[in-house]
Image: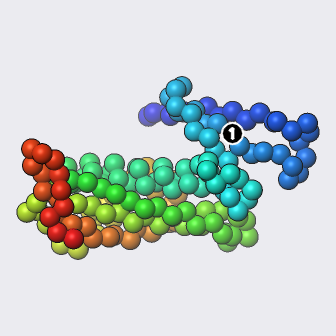
Amino acid sequence: MSDLSIQLHWQRIEPQLKPGAYSAEHTVQYNQCYDVLVDAAPDWGGDPANTNPEQALASALSSCHMMTFLALAAKAGWPVASYHDYAVAHLGKNARGQMSVTQIDLHPVVRFDTGFQVSDEEMEQMQDRAHRYCFIANTLADSVRINILHAPTVRHTREGAYNVAA
């Protein structure tokens, strides 16, 4: 199997490390070249301009789900033109009373090439399969909810793509 890694770097900028009196801002480096500033969620004192771990978790799930969906759609011959998602990580207390990401909601919008349609049932089945085979979803178990949103068809021409119907 694969080992996939990141590098994380935090450096204290305050004279001393004291509770509630230090910055949690740090850098996460991907592939030894791409740095992302990460901080606590804004409700926990982080800079809202930075990514927070809970957003990164939602992003990882959304990306994994999309890539799994696209692989399954390609095998099924579905001409997906675009895929968009709005993912929300919900913070709350788990069954043990500890703060955690209690649920992640995905809101995928899939657009197909002109003339191709699937039923709501077929879309739901494909999204369920994508969820079942997504590595990240399998790690998170039952805390994922998928809310399928409907999208217009996209027509592809030599000049580019454009919406046909809303």
In the picture, measured across the screen, residue 165 lies left or right of residue 133, that is left
Q: Specify the quadrant that holds the C terminus.
A: bottom left
Image quadrant in which you'd find residue 122: bottom left
Q: Amino acid at mark 1?
A: His
In the picture, measured across the screen, residue 61 lies left or right of residue 46, that is left
Q: Specify the quadrant that holds the N terminus.
A: top left
Image quadrant in which you'd find residue 98: bottom right
Image quadrant in which you'd find residue 164: bottom left
Can you give x and y, in whole percent of width and height, for residue 99 in the image? Answer: 70, 64
- Farthest residue, direction top: 32
Can you give x and y, in whole percent of width and height, for residue 26 in the image? Answer: 69, 39
Residue at the image position 78 percent from the left and 45 percent from the top: 23
Number of numbered tags placed on the structure image: 1
Residue 98 at least partly seen: yes
Residue 6 at least partly seen: no
Residue at the image position 61 percent from the left and 48 percent from the top: 50
**Mark 1 packing: few (<14 Cα in 10 Å), some, or many (20+)?**
some
Q: How is the image coloured?
A: rainbow
- Closest to the observer: 162 or 150? 162
- Closest to the observer: 161 or 120? 161
Can you give x and y, in whole percent of width and height, for residue 78 in the image? Answer: 16, 56
Can you give x and y, in whole percent of width and height, for residue 41 in the image? Answer: 66, 56
Helix, strand or loop status at disc 1: strand
Q: What residue would you read off at disc 1?
A: 26
- Farthest residue, direction bottom: 120
In the picture, measured across the screen, residue 68 lies left or right of residue 49, that is left
- Closest to the observer: 166 or 16? 166
In the picture, measured across the screen, residue 82 lies left or right of residue 34, that is left
Residue at the image position 20 percent from the left and 53 percent from the top: 81
Residue at the image position 63 percent from the left and 66 percent from the top: 91
